[in-house]
Amino acid sequence: MYTDHTLIIKELERSIKFNNWNTILSFLPKGSYLVGGYIRDIILGRVTEEVDIDIVVPLNAIEIGKNISNNIESKFIILDKKRNVVRIILKHISMDITNQVSSTIEGDLSARDFSINSIAFLFDKKRLFDPQNGLKDLELSLLRTHSEINLLNDPLRILRCFRFVSELNFKIDNKLLTFIKKNKGKLHLVAKERINNEIHKIVNGSNALDAIILIRKLGIFGPENLYKDSFFLDLKKVNFIEFNQYEKENFLPLFFISQILDEVSLKKFKFGRNVIAKIKLLRKWHFLLKKNDITQLNELDRFLLHQELEMFLPSFIFYLPQNLRFDWLNRWRDKNDKLFHPSNLLNGDVIKKNLKIKDGPILGELLRYLSKELAYKRLNNFDEAIYKAEQWIQQNAPKCD
């Protein structure tokens, strides 16, 4: 992490040139400055594919944005006409331009959410301005706010604290933690879609586990007794060491979502049907295994478990006894394991053509039966599958043509 102002400025200028937005600077009036996450990420040495830039100009942000867009091939959007906020989108760059609100730069910076986002780079003077000691907080990996009112102006910033824990491995200032506990109820004022988006960022961070544990500890999404439900695990005892990077990126986010939100909250925060359906299946099989030892499941139930959970089984691994997790994960990784990846030697069209049956429940049951037989290695080839299908039809659908 950079701590020397000269090095930070050099890296900022290098990054501006590398991302090809230095031409835009010629359209900015004197007194304009860069602020926010772009500077923070440069200091942290954090590289992202999508570049988000925040620029403050003394006046006329809309006119300046239009001028830039007219001269440089880009998309121009007015985000807030009343507050003079515009966005310019240029390939992988999203640049927001807004008017300075206070009479001084320091006044504007003191109104920002956190000190680490309140560092400004003054274009014309080529120097950093850090009245809130954001550089020191970056060095300490500490999340702190200058004024709690700044957070209440947009209560989503309460939730954003946990994103910085997840993405940057930051600690939250004790005073700020107290404020969060007291004001978490203000989140109901925020659009549900914005909360949904923030949760997705939290669960996908490299340090998501600590953020999720803290969210549960503070009861951000429900009453204190919410997590007494046996479906919510003791996350401090969860070990992710057996997961590879692909599995962490693709299956832990779903698991984390399931560990902070119940079904009512999933719907309230506008989660998609696919996510809700998956978490319902996780709950279904967890509670079934609470009543029945996994080793005592009959063949059909064990097959149905893998059929329903196949595409996201690693999200379910933590509900299994410790001695089974590694074996299940390894078997799931083997795409040729027909129990963990149910498939079939015959499809519906082949069965209809060869056995003269029609679409309907019977066909679905037959396909499931054949897939189960293959999973338990009682089928080896096409001819055996046809033979077993004929036998099954005789026993289960004698009236079928």
Image (cartoon, rainbow, N blue to C red):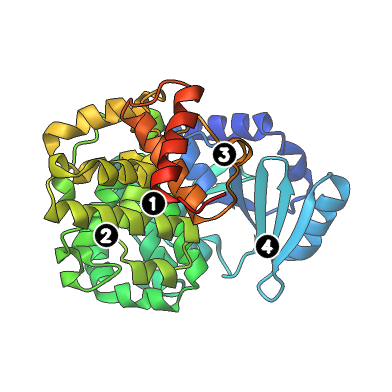
In the image, taking residue 27 as reference, residue 94 lies left or right, namely left
What residue is shown with label 4?
58
**Image point (60%, 70%), residue name:** 101
Q: Nearer the viewer, residue 122 or 190?
A: 190
Which numbered dot is residue 395?
none
**Which residue carries the number 1 mark?**
202
Q: Where is residue 240 in the image (x, y as percent from the top left)?
A: 24, 35
Residue occupying image coordinates x 58% and y 47%:
357
Q: Do the residues labelled 4 and 1 touch (CB within 8 Å)?
A: no
Which numbered disc flags the more N-terminal residue, 3 or 2? 2
Q: Give residue 100's position: percent from left, percent from top.
A: 62, 65
* Number of the front mark, 4 or 3: 3
Q: Earlier in the sequence, mark 4 or mark 3?
A: 4
Q: Which residue is drawn at 81% across and 63% down?
A: 63
CA gap, disc 4 and disc 2: 39 Å
Say if mark 1 contacts mark 2, CB within 8 Å: yes
Element type at mark 2: helix
**Mark 1 vs 2, N-terminal side:** 1
Q: Which of 103 and 78 is in front in this view?
A: 78
The secondary element bearing badge 3 is classed as helix
Labels 1, 3: front one: 3
User: Which of the two discs, 3 and 2, sits closer to the camera?
Assistant: 3
Q: Distance between the residues labelled 1 and 3?
A: 52 Å
Label 2 is placed on what type of residue?
A: Ile
248 to 194, vertically: above or below = above
